[in-house]
Image (cartoon, rainbow, N blue to C red):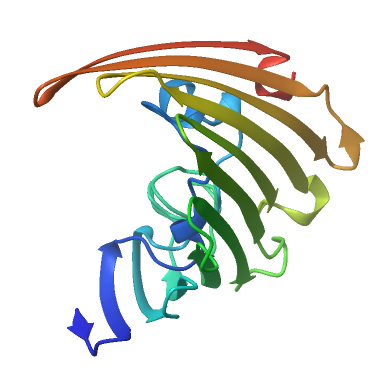
Amino acid sequence: NLDLGTVNIEMGSDNSLGIEDVKVLLPFVNNRIQDIGGVEYGANVNDNSSGIHNIGVNLKAGSLGNISVAYAPNVANTTTAGGTDGDAYNTGNTQTASEASISFRGSLGVPGLTVGVGYLEGNSSNNTFDDEEGLSYGANYNFGQFTVGYHRIENDSAVVKTASVNTKADLYGVAFKASDNLSVGVYQIKQERTNEGVTQPELESTLISVGYALGTAKIQYDFISADNYNNV
């Protein structure tokens, strides 16, 4: 890393740059729905910095927030291609591609507010595959013991052009800090998906989380359910 004050330059294969900086915009008490049940319970943000060799720049915009840019020159056909979430260039696709993403995350100078927006675009070297696109935006706001949030995720997956997959997910959440030790959160994902132009059943996932801190330790409970699991 090269830290130049308001500008930080990074190179690596497992960092949080570009659109990944706005991967989490809900006030989760414990774990995200996707971390508990996988992407079958809700889409992940397509990123180009998890498990991918990349170079990126973080630009601090004062009290407004942070701008992050990431560029991956070669997204290869590996198990981590398209990020450790496995939600970008699919394993088994004999192709390489470059990916670039940019994001903004910050408070805009408003206490208690966090907003984020990010965009990713891939360029496949194989004309039989779609170029990947990803969009992530949302906000959360803390007032007293409550934090509420909304997050929108849109993914155009990099698959064969005759089998294009488009996913749009709306995530909602509220967290309540009952005490210094106890927090409770309720979250929901509503997700639409089209596969080769055919609309699939709408996925609806719900997560209830309870977290209790015991000094340096934490007790966690997460309950997740879904209707039309994996949009089926």
**Percent x, y of residue 201:** 83, 22
The answer to whether 228 is drawn above or below residue 116 in the figure is above
**Percent x, y of residue 81:** 43, 55
Front-most of 51 and 222? 222
> How many labels sit on residues?
0
Q: Quadrant of residue 149?
A: top right
- Quadrant where the N terminus lies? bottom left
Residue at 61%, 62% in the rendered image: 117
Q: Is residue 199 left or right of residue 149?
A: right
Q: Residue furthest right?
A: 198
Q: Is residue 207 left or right of residue 135?
A: left
Q: Is residue 14 left or right of residue 44?
A: left
Q: Is residue 68 left or right of residue 154?
A: left
Residue at 71%, 37% in the rendered image: 170
Residue at 46%, 58% in the rendered image: 20
- Asked if residue 47 shows in the view, the reply is no
**Percent x, y of residue 189:** 66, 28
The answer to whether 167 is drawn above or below residue 58 in the figure is above
Front-most of 210 and 123? 210
- Asked if residue 118 shows in the view, the reply is yes
- Quadrant where the C terminus lies? top right
